[in-house]
Image (spheres, helix red, strand yellow):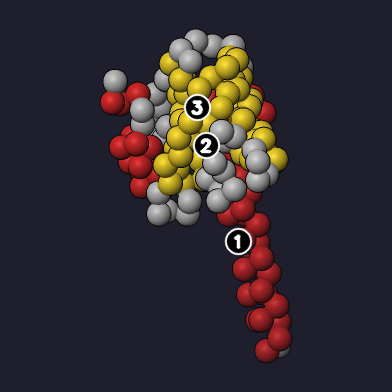
Amino acid sequence: MKYIKFILLFLVFIGSILYITKKGAKEYTDTNAVLKNGVVFEGTVTDIKRSHNHGFGVLSVNVSNSNVNEFSKELKHGIYPYRIKGKKAEIYLPIYIEREIGDRIKLISDREIIYYKGKKSEDKGEVYIITNPSDINFAKENAIFNKE
């Protein structure tokens, strides 16, 4: 009888974890659905600003190829992970130590992916709607478009 209580408690614990995980995954998918907007651009990193919050930062990019001339839509909750204005863009995301000025990037919003090609690394990462308040503040404070 003593073990049955522990088994039931364990099953409730596992069930709770599965429920929370499923609900979180659905929220993430729903939030990022707005990224299915056809935006694709590529260019060269011209500046990197890193925060002290899990390496979050802002990449400034000289755009060499883009299917949109401007993108700066607003969201009710969070911000898009990029903005474009003419031949300039900025990308908001965690920035790893290997990233440096001169790296080439290609962002494909529909696939929620960014490709990097640099001297130190060549890989890909995720783009997603930024919802962390400190990351949003950092992006707004360091945005090149706010200074124009």
Can residue 114 be seen in the rendering of this structure? no
Mark 2 surroundings: few (<14), some (14-19) or many (≥20) residues within 10 A: some
Q: Residue at x 50, y 27 (%)?
A: 61
Residue 119's disc is none
Q: Position of residue 13 (x, y in %)?
A: 62, 68
Q: Position of residue 93 (x, y in %)?
A: 50, 40
Q: Nearer the viewer, mark 2 or mark 3?
A: 2
Which residue is tagged 3? 61
Q: CA distance from mark 3 to mark 1?
A: 43 Å
Q: Residue at x 41, y 35 (%)?
A: 78
Label 2 is placed on what type of residue?
A: Ile
Which residue is tagged 2? 101
- SS under mark 2: loop
Rendering quarter of residue 132? top left
Tell me whether the residue at label 2 lies in contact with that at label 1, contact meaning CB atoms closer than 8 angstroms: no
Residue 16's disc is 1
56 on left or right of 122? left
Q: Residue at x 42, y 32 (%)?
A: 79
Q: Position of residue 64 (x, y in %)?
A: 58, 17
Residue 12 vs 134, above or below: the answer is: below
65 on left or right of 138? right
Q: Upstream in the sequence, badge 2 or badge 1? A: 1
Q: Residue at x 61, y 45 (%)?
A: 25
Number of disc labels: 3
Q: Position of residue 60 (x, y in %)?
A: 46, 30
Q: Nearer the viewer, mark 3 or mark 1?
A: 3
Residue ranking furthest to the bottom: 2
- SS under mark 3: strand
Tell me whether the residue at label 3 lies in contact with that at label 1, contact meaning CB atoms closer than 8 angstroms: no
